[in-house]
Amino acid sequence: MKILIVSDTHRRDENLKFVIEEEKPFDMLIHLGDVEGSEQWIPEWAGEGCMMAMVMGNNDFFSRLERELELEIGPHRALLTHGHYYGVSMGAEGLADEARSRGCDIAMYGHTHRPFLDNIGGVTVLNPGSLSYPRQEGHRPSYMIMTMDHDGKVRYDQRYL
């Protein structure tokens, strides 16, 4: 299974469209918030049959997206959130604690516009960064690919434009 993970596109969709075309085919697209209205078009760009999971960010003022989602991804359970309710700008430990308390072994967030991947107390915590307004050193737009083999083993690949 191949999953494209993005966040913080802020309706500047050129890079998102490019990444979708570059990474096809994939089985699922996860957007971790601050879509700012593009959520209605992303399923069409991803293509028929692509599973979608999107959550609302702090700039999605009129969105009907869920604030958080919990997903089963093979043998794994993932908590998806934008992250601003968990103080991720100060660190991801609170989000990891929340994910663990819900029986999740993966936590995905956005908000900081900085790529992140770590294991915190048995929870894989990740942030793909931002495709539109990157804030990490070098300021390269980023996203993540998650691949899972038939045995449920997961690999994460941080990618940059």
Image (spheres, helix red, strand yellow):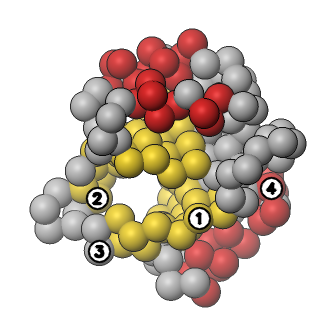
Q: Secondary structure at mark 2?
A: strand
| Labelled pair 2, 3 in contact (Cβ < 8 Å) | no
Residue at 29% x, 74% y is: 75
Image quadrant where residue 150 sits? bottom left
How crowded pointer 3 is (Cα within 10 Å; few <14, some 14-19, many 20+) is rated as few
Pointer 1 residue: 69
Residue at 54% x, 38% y is: 6
| Labelled pair 4, 2 in contact (Cβ < 8 Å) | no
Circle nearer the N terminus (3, 4): 3
Q: CA distance from mark 4 to mark 2?
A: 26 Å
Across and down, in percent, residue 119 comes to 49, 66
Residue at 56% x, 28% y is: 41
Looking at the rendered structure, which numbered label has been put on residue 154? 2
How crowded pointer 4 is (Cα within 10 Å; few <14, some 14-19, many 20+) is rated as some
Circle nearer the N terminus (1, 2): 1
Q: CA distance from mark 2 to mark 3?
A: 10 Å
| Labelled pair 3, 4 in contact (Cβ < 8 Å) | no
Q: Amino acid at mark 2?
A: Val
- Asked if one can make out residue 99 in the rendered structure from this viewpoint, the answer is yes
Pointer 4 residue: 84
Q: Tell which tag, 1 or 2, sits nearer the viewer.
A: 1
Q: Amino acid at mark 3?
A: Pro
Residue 47 lies, with reference to residue 18, above or below; the image says below
Q: Secondary structure at mark 3?
A: loop
Residue 79 lies, with reference to residue 60, above or below; the image says below
Q: Tell which tag, 1 or 4, sits nearer the viewer.
A: 1
Q: Amino acid at mark 4?
A: His
